[in-house]
Amino acid sequence: MKKLFFNLLKIISACIVSVIVLSILCLGYYFIPVHIENKKHNTDFTWTPNSIWIKATEGFSYGRFDANGYNNKKIIDNPDILVLGSSHTIGTQVKQEETFSSVLATKLKDKYTVYNMGMDNHTLYKNSANLKKNLELFKKTPKYVILETYTLYVLEDDVNNIIGDTYPFIQSYSDGIIGTLQKIPFFRLMYFQLTHGLSEKLLDKKVDNGLKNNLVNDDFDGNIIEIEYYDKLFSYYSELENDYNTKFIIMYHPSLIMKEDGSVVGNTNSKELSYFKYYANKYNINFLDMTNDFINMYSNEYHLPHGFNTGLLGSGHLNKYGHEKIGIALYEKILEMEN
């Protein structure tokens, strides 16, 4: 019995030491804090305030979140320009000074302040549902609100949940066993890898790399586009602009697909794009389509806006070239709006 106890103790000790050693090795590759519930509810969660992050899963980047848990070097209490978006906007795949929010802030440093409230898993529709809370967060309403999106497909449920203030809440698990496991770098990295293709490889399943047959997705897998919900969504934007005396800029960034002749095209459903542009124009909502900017960047500089040297060509998050091009385009858009 005593021998069994000591053998079990050896196994447990070996496991603990292994996890410690592997966690130390993981620190320079993937170190992300735990996200916590946002009590202000302008985003469903934030990253742990003042925590650091290190990523080498797409390129290599590092930084420190501000005291609010967003990716800025410092808090701006009443920004002139508020940036909302997904993991592309939060930009932890590039250095803090390389995000499109930082590029825009540098271009406007003598004119306007910019604050990045981008957050992982916060799509255009999640951010649209939280718009009122974001507009009421500051003593002075931001003059401009930038809404980043990588999709233009508008669903009935999304629009109804946005207007009805019933959009599903993203739960944070920062306490208990799950919260504790998330704080261990090795387990955090393994979870990331399992949810980003490793599980499919272990099960011998094909992983979708977003480059199906090198064709532009022009039928959205057969889904029916319901025009009335585009109308409802942009009508909602227009009402908020009038009620809060602000202006929205919806910035769309498609990935690019390389053709056999070496040229590129935007991976955009032409019908969705046409409806999106039509209703944005109908309700006087500013819409910035980065497709041509990205194509010109590739043609002139041979840079793709998405993807890193540690991943697939043109696939994944915005890289520093994509961020820079968006920051410059937003700067020019704001000057155009003011002139």
Image (cartoon, helix red, strand yellow):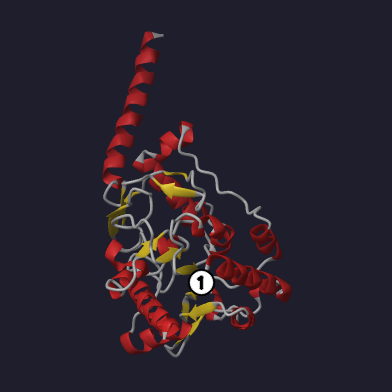
Quarter of the image with the N terminus in it: top left
Q: Which residue is mark 1?
A: 248
- Amino acid, disc 1: Phe
* Element type where label 1 sits in the image: strand
Residue 245 is situated, as x and y percent measured from the top left of the image, at: 52, 69
- Residue drawn at (28%, 55%), measured in percent from left and top? 63
Say left or right for 241 vs 140.
Answer: right
Quarter of the image with the C terminus in it: bottom left
- Residue drawn at (56%, 81%), measured in percent from left and top? 215
Depth order, front residue of 136/205: 136
Residue 182 is situated, as x and y percent measured from the top left of the image, at: 42, 40
Depth order, front residue of 69/7: 69
Depth order, front residue of 210/327: 327
Q: Report if residue 88 is visible in the image.
A: no
Q: So how many labels did they put on this image?
A: 1
- Residue drawn at (28%, 46%), measured in percent from left and top? 27
Q: Quadrant of residue 158?
A: bottom right
Q: Is residue 203 above or below residue 271?
A: above
Q: Is residue 166 above or below residue 221?
A: above
Say left or right for 21 vs 4.
Answer: left
Residue 253 is situated, as x and y percent measured from the top left of the image, at: 47, 75
Residue 244 is situated, as x and y percent measured from the top left of the image, at: 54, 65
Q: Is residue 158 above or below residue 189?
A: below
Q: Is residue 92 above or below residue 109?
A: above
